[in-house]
Image (cartoon, rainbow, N blue to C red):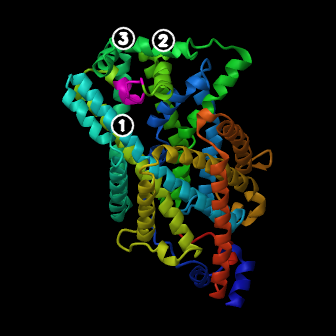
Amino acid sequence: MLEWSGNLRQRSFGLTEPKRFCEMASEQLFARKTSGLVKEVRTRDALFFGVSYANPWVGMAVILMTYPWIASGGSLTLGVLLCAVGSAFHVSMYAFLAMTMPRSGGDYVWVSRILHPAIGFAQSLVIVVSGLFWFGITPGIWLVMLPNMISLVGAMAGNTGIIHIAAIFSIPWMLSVIGVLLAVVFIFVLFFGQRVYFKIQTSLIVFVFFTIGLFVVLSLFTSRATFLSRFDNIAWYLTGDHYYAQTLIAQATKDGLLPIPQLSGGQWLWATLFVMPMAFWSIGYPYFSTYIAGEWKEAKMTALVSCLGGLAICVIVILASMASIINVAGEPLVQALANGYYVHPSTYFGIAPYAYLYAAGVTDNLVVFGIICAGSLAMAILAVFVALYPLTRCIFAWAFDRIVPEKLGSVSSRYHVPIPAILLSGAGGIIIVLLFQYLYSLALELTISIVISTVIFSFTMVALTAIVLPWRRKEIYETSPIQYKVLGFPVISLLGICDLIFLSFIGYSYVSVSAFGSFDWGSYEFFTALFCLGLIGYFISRAYRKRQKIDLDLTFREIPPA
């Protein structure tokens, strides 16, 4: 064993070793010779996976519900496009790293091999926990959407009985029912392999795109007067106010939100720049398809298309839907709705200003309205699934590297999926949902804050990984397909530097402006403690494996076998 270990140190990555040596090395260093995962994820599947995680339909709503207090008077369109430029550096960096090490587990694999395995594991642990927290609050989207949609149907149909049904879905314990049900469905679907999941994903995402296109087209053929008339009719049925749009606008004017300020020069530019952090909540995340890179059929093409193509789709969806809403409803009403929803919830008519509210103003046909609402729900289903999916690959990668028990990385020989990792992720999601049951508001604030902390730190670690790759792990870089240079400087390092600059502004915005999220230093302490726990956990595992004559230091000098 000692003799082989010495050879492994000298022959990093086994580039010149004979087949028998490579097989013995993999068997000694990893849980088994091959991962057991199958390369069956097509480029289209990875593209839709990234778009599902980014969720541009909700991303658009986040911008419209937040910008009145941050970027009013700036250019929403230019702000989104600037964010797209910065995010292009961001997702391209992830695509390049995935091409360098196309293995499932995402940034855990890269950071652990390039910076340090302890940092890679600790960072990945934080991502998994924050991902579970994120899953814990996603059923709350349903708890908002379903009652709202049912109330709108009742108001459009003039049927109070339907409106009363909406109250059923507002009962607090429905959060647990929906969350547990979605987690169980997630586990059940993934048990039957990736092909089943991606067939469902493709069907849902195509339907979502159809409903978004339908909404945009309807808004083009709806006058503002018609929209306002339909809106006031619905609001009258729910509030008794025949001129509710004007009531909301008057309240926003009283609060100082309206009229929209006419900015110029530096003030206009600053307001426009602050659109970027809002847009980044969606535009910055198509890279999540890299967590299943080890299952891509063709790494290079899939990496670029899924990351950059996903970015392009998100930008188009956000700009088209945002422009449609502002054009048909008018910017004053858009801002007034956000003001009523957040600032005056006790007097507001209760319908969250998501896309389905505006859909009720562009059509009075209940069937068409129902189709658009179904599209929003389909997007919500995908958002729940992709919140847990990457976590399964992180747990699998930990087990395959033997940091955690190898059984957690077991793969079904029939369906080629990591069953224990799926069960553990699903169970963790269920536990978090149940814990959040009666503390949803607090949980929402805590989750957003933890996610912000994770984003700032995790993205920084990945950017540093990209910057130092050509020098710290020269042997990896020189055998990778990303050896592009500009004036002799590696492109991957340039992407990391540009991403750090871009993320510095995003991180500053999230921490300094409360409207971007409920960031507080208490959650930062939780994040720090969790990261330290990951560091300690790695070194405990390293010592334990050393007693078994397994050297994790050697493991992390190698790219895991496919």
Q: From the viewer's perspective, is the residue at label 2 or at label 1 nearer?
A: 2
Observer able to see residue 180: yes
The residue to which callout 1 is attached is 145
Residue at (61% x, 29% y) in the render: 275
Alpha-carbon distance for marks 3 and 2?
11 Å
Q: Is residue 358 on the magenta stretch?
A: yes
Q: In the rendered image of this protein, does residue 426 appear above or below residue 364? A: below
Is residue 457 magenta-colored? Answer: no
Point out residue 355 in the picture as x, y percentages from the top left corner: 40, 29
Percent across and percent down for residue 65 are: 50, 28
Q: Amino acid at mark 1?
A: Met
Considering only order in the chain, which callout, 1 or 2, is on the residue closer to the N terminus? 1
Name the kind of residue labelled 2 in the image. Ala
* Mark 3 vs 2: CB contact within 8 A: no
Q: Position of residue 530 (x, y in %)?
A: 63, 61
The residue that label 2 is drawn on is 250
Badge 3: how crowded within 10 Å, few (<14), some, or many (20+)?
A: some
Q: Give the image quarter of residue 8.
A: bottom right
Q: Residue under circle 3?
A: 243
Structural distance between the alpha carbons of marks 3 and 1: 24 Å
Q: Regarding mark 3 in the picture, which secondary structure is present there? A: loop
The residue segment tinted magenta is 347-359
